[in-house]
């Protein structure tokens, strides 16, 4: 038997030929879904998010959850509380049926949040159960707080903590005063040394300037005498007549005088150079000492500023901690310890206005699509069987 293939034209023809069957299946699916949607009882959902309270740790004043979110969720789904809920609220359910309608789960990535979800056909009943569970969890946590928290002990511990901080603040203030005094004295000492160095510098400059000035005053006279003696000696030597014995002795005297004055001149120039060099060296040494002391002064000022900044930061941190402790103490004085950091419903349960299911419109649309697909599949199957005969 050769296999026959349907073209698009043949498919359209089959649909037209068996359109009544397709419409019948489509109608049955739509009507059945609509009837079922309206027959099924509506289901209402009530949700509530509970934030687990905290207990104050007396040793560190840190606040820790009364219990974990997992433990809280397990308590809400436990047989004991659900059985008690059936009795107190007079619910027409067995424990097994009620447990299927209640869900309690920790909120992801949160250590102290639990979400309750309740699904009931009666919205008021769902709301009553949600409120009941929230109240029971709150009562349970209040009992735990009463066992682990003592208001008088917490207040006494806060008093000790505040007194300890106040003592540290006083020590910081005294330390700051001592730091300022010590560094001010150090700065005064450095400034005195700088004044001494400046005075020495002035003395060095004055002393060596006087020495150099005295030398400079002698040098022109000696230089002039040497020039004059050389001139006279030159005139005597230029005369054509032979020198007498007296003139020869006078010439020798001029030469010896020139030699002595030249030596004196050289000595004075050497002394002037040495004095200038010594002055330069002493001033350089004086400048090094001055620079060293200025650097020590800058370092002292910087260290003083850093220490004061650290003291200020520590002081501010302690003041903030002290204020927080005083605020917490005041809250505790005004309230009972069981009312501080209590468990509460941050998203309280509310009576739903619309059911979550059945979704009539969605059910009808899905049934219509399924009916259409089934109808088309049925007629093409029948057409294929007829052609195969």
Image: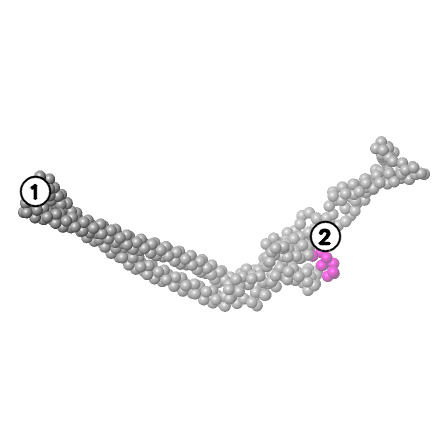
The N terminus lies in quadrant:
top right
Q: Which residues are magenta?
A: 94-102
Q: Nearer the viewer, residue 144 or 257?
A: 257
The x, y position of residue 190, in whole percent, is 29, 57
Q: Main secondary structure of the magenta part?
A: helix
Residue closest to the eye, 81 or 307 = 307
Q: Quadrant of residue 172?
A: bottom left
Q: Is residue 274 magenta?
A: no
Examine the rendering and report whether any part of residue 251 can be seen.
yes
Q: Quadrant of residue 141?
A: bottom right
The disc, 2 or 1, on the residue closer to the chain's N-terminal end is 2
> Does the CB distance between marks 2 and 1 fall below 8 Å?
no
| Residue under the point 77% across and 43% down | 366
Whole-percent x and y of residue 23?
Answer: 83, 37
Camera-nearest residue between 26 and 213: 213
Q: Which residue is mark 2?
A: 121
- Classify residue 74 by image quadrant: bottom right
**Residue drawn 64% across the image and 60% down it:** 70
Q: Which residue is mark 1?
A: 242
Q: CA distance from mark 2 to mark 1?
A: 158 Å
Q: Position of residue 280 (x, y in %)?
A: 25, 51
Residue sitting farthest toward the top: 9
Residue drawn 14% across the image and 45% down it? 223
Tell me if 283 is positioned left or right of 77 in this view: left
Pointer 2: residues within 10 angstroms few (<14), some, or many (20+)? Answer: some
């Amino acid at each position: 038997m050769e296999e026959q293939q349907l073209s698009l034209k043949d498919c359209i023809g089959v649909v037209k030929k068996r359109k009544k069957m397709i419409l019948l299946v489509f109608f049955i699916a739509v009507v059945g879904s609509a009837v079922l949607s309206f027959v099924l009882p509506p289901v209402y959902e009530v949700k509530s998010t509970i934030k687990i309270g905290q207990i104050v740790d007396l040793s560190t004043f840190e606040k820790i959850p009364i219990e974990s979110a997992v433990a809280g969720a397990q308590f809400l789904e436990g047989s004991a509380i659900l059985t008690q809920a059936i009795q107190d609220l007079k619910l027409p359910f067995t424990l097994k049926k009620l447990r299927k309608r209640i869900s309690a789960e920790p909120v992801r990535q949160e250590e102290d949040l639990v979400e309750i979800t309740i699904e009931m056909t009666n919205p008021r009943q769902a709301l009553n159960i949600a409120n009941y569970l929230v109240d029971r969890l709150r009562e349970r946590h209040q009992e735990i707080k009463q066992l682990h928290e003592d208001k008088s002990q917490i207040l006494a511990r806060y008093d000790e903590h505040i007194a300890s901080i106040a003592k540290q603040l006083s020590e910081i203030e005294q330390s700051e005063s001592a730091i300022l005094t010590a560094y001010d004295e150090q700065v005064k000492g450095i400034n005195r040394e700088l004044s001494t160095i400046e005075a020495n510098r002035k003395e060095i400059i004055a002393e060596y300037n006087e020495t150099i000035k005295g030398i400079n005053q002698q040098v022109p006279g000696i230089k002039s005498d040497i020039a004059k003696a050389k001139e006279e000696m030159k005139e005597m030597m230029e005369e054509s007549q032979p020198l007498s014995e007296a003139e020869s002795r006078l010439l020798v005297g001029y030469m010896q005088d020139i030699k002595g004055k030249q030596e004196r001149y050289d000595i004075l120039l050497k002394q002037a150079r040495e004095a200038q060099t010594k002055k330069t060296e002493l001033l350089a040494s004086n400048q090094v000492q001055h620079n060293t002391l200025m650097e020590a002064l800058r370092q002292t000022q910087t260290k003083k500023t850093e220490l004061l900044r650290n003291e200020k930061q520590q002081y501010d941190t302690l003041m903030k901690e002290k204020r927080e402790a005083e605020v917490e103490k005041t809250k505790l004085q005004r309230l009972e310890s069981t009312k501080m950091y209590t468990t509460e419903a941050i998203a309280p349960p509310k009576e739903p206005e619309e059911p979550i299911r059945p979704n009539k419109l969605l059910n009808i649309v899905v049934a219509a699509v399924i009916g259409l697909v089934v109808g088309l599949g049925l007629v093409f199957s029948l057409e294929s069987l007829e052609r195969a005969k």
